[in-house]
Image (cartoon, rainbow, N blue to C red):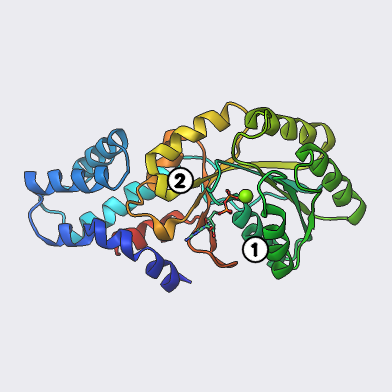
Amino acid sequence: MYGKLNEKLEAVRRKWAIKGLFARGARDDTFWESLEEILISGDVGSRQTEEIILSLRERTSSDTSDSEALGTLSSILCERLRAVEGTGMPVRFSTGPTVVMLNGVNGSGKTTTAAKLAWILGNEGKKVLIAAADTFRAGAVEQLNVWGSRAGVRVIFHTHGGDPGAVVFDAIRAVEAGNFDCLIVDTAGRLHNKTNLMEELSKISRIIDRNCQGWTLESFLVVDAVSGQNGLKQAEVFGGTVPLTGLIITKYDHAAKGGIILSAGNELGLPVRYVGIGENMDDLKLFEPEEFVNALLGI
Ligand SMILES: Nc1nc2c(ncn2[C@@H]2O[C@H](COP(=O)(O)OP(=O)(O)O)[C@@H](O)[C@H]2O)c(=O)[nH]1
Ligand SMILES: [Mg+2]
């Protein structure tokens, strides 16, 4: 598993080449400038880059060896991630069923993530149902049905153009009738036909609130790593509409920069829960800070 993650993160690791920078020797002005440049151009964000560098300066001295200093950087990054409560926490389960709502802009990876998550939870022995609440996008239901059958997961859907709220309502009933452990709700990601996307999402959210009493509620924002810092702006819009409990960062295997994974949680005050690292069913990973940070740094 660790080998696979290392392989998927290779593009970002090479681009950053942090290990090489540390191995160059003296941590002089050029070193600090280069590190700053790597982090900023790597999409960590300027404010967080500044904090990270300040922290590393404080916690190292000229006596610190290169490898120790690199280890300290790793610790700093992990501590910052862990400071956001819930980072790396799997979907929560309690006595009742759990509902997981997936939100995000078009193309961010919601539908694929719904199937991948169903696959993970199914492998853990959970009985999972998917609600195809993106009734607008042509092919979305077919896409889910194909993935759903691969994962051995049932999908509740209505006809194209139907009311997403009604799909969710039916799915909630089906969870209760069929003793399912988890309902994953795939939603639409763009404005369409006079219906405002945000109104639609808040309607779904209200249906869940009203009909899922005693359930555990999770609502994830699905952000793709390629959109980088811009992706964070989406979060503010979505966060203002539906209560979010975490982030899923997708397409990390395609990210040219990758720093979003280090800064998104702290910027938004939302924990990164899972990361998408490819297009296959088993390409969603629980976000484990140490594993990701060390793969990024090349430790
Ligand atoms: N490489 C890669 N592609 C992904 C990942 N997640 C999603 N995709 C691709 O991104 C595209 C959009 O995904 P989709 O789930 O339809 O996005 P949605 O519009 O938010 O539902 C599809 O071609 C997916 O295969 C990922 O983690 N890595
Ligand atoms: Mg979709």
| Residue 281 % position (x, y) | 60, 66
Q: Is residue 88 above or below residue 216?
A: below
- For badge 1, the amino acid type reads Ile
Vertical arrangement, residue 230 with respect to residue 38, above or below:
above
Q: Quadrant of residue 151?
A: bottom right
Q: Nearer the viewer, residue 38 or 94?
A: 38
Tag 2–tag 1 contact (CB < 8 Å):
no
Out of 139 and 74, give the one closest to the viewer.
139
Q: CA distance from mark 2 to mark 1?
A: 23 Å
**Left or right: where 209 falls relative to 50:** right
Can residue 39 be seen in the rendering of this structure?
yes
Q: Earlier in the sequence, mark 2 or mark 1?
A: 2
The residue sitting at 14% across, 45% down in the picture is 32
Q: Quadrant of residue 204?
A: top right
Q: Left or right: 139 with respect to 230?
A: right
Q: Amino acid at mark 2?
A: Arg
Write the residue at 22% across / 57% down.
18
Which numbered dot is residue 120?
1
Q: Nearer the viewer, residue 62 or 157?
A: 157
